[in-house]
Image (spheres, rainbow, N blue to C red):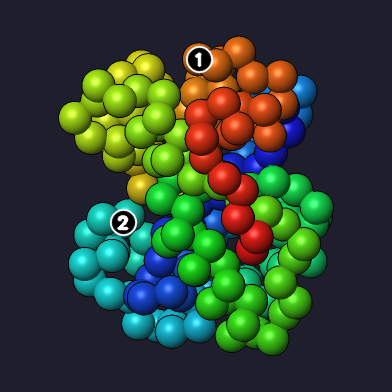
Amino acid sequence: MNFVAIDFETAHANFPCEIGLTQVGNGKIIDSKSWFIKPACFPFMNPLNQRVHGISAAKVAHAYTFEEIWGELKPWFDNNILVAHNAAFDMRVLRAALTYYNLAIPNSEYFCSVSLSRKAWKHLHNHSLGVVSEFHNIQFQHHRASDDAQACAIISLKAFQTVKAINVNDGLNKLGVRLKKL
């Protein structure tokens, strides 16, 4: 059971201002990190986004750009299965950042933990990160990339446990969720 959970917070549109990554190995969280990112739209920060995550232009003024930290991030992505809660959003932000800086898209596949949640816990009225985390008593600071990525990883592991999955592919097959190519 090996994968990497990813979460982005954005300054505006697809411009990331924070990334969180949580690595799962042999069914356990083995590492979790986050980085503030000086967004390409700096110093502009969409006030609506800032209200959600609390990340201001001042917090990212001295951060590295996505391009500058990509060398440190890339090993988390290469040949790994990725997961995000609402993966369409996070993968769009990732592709946009890579494209903006003319960086190669890594050889990765991904799945969505919202899709897993909908299959594993059909009775929930909503499958947002907050609702599913509350259902599982996962304590986290919502809209902080590291915490969100870690909650996503835990939710994915719990979904795989519901079907007694032996690995990610087995769990996805049993839950009827497909891997997508980054």
Q: Is 120 displayed left or right of 37 in the figure?
A: left
The span from disc 2 to disc 1 (Cα, nearest Å) is 35 Å
Q: Residues within 10 Å of mark 1 (few under 14, many from 20)?
A: few
Position in image of residue 62 (x %, y %): 55, 72
Q: Nearer the viewer, residue 82 or 52?
A: 82
Position in image of residue 83 (x %, y %): 57, 45
Q: Secondary structure at mark 2?
A: loop
Q: What residue is disc 1 on?
A: 162
Closer to the N terminus: mark 2 or mark 1?
2
Q: Residue at x 62, y 39 (%)?
A: 22
Question: Looking at the rendering, in which quadrant would you find the N terminus?
Answer: top right
Q: Amino acid at mark 1?
A: Thr
* 182 is higher (above) or lower (below) than 162: below
Position in image of residue 61 (x %, y %): 49, 74
Q: Is residue 21 visible in the rendered structure shown here?
A: no
Q: Amino acid at mark 2?
A: Gly
Q: Secondary structure at mark 1?
A: helix
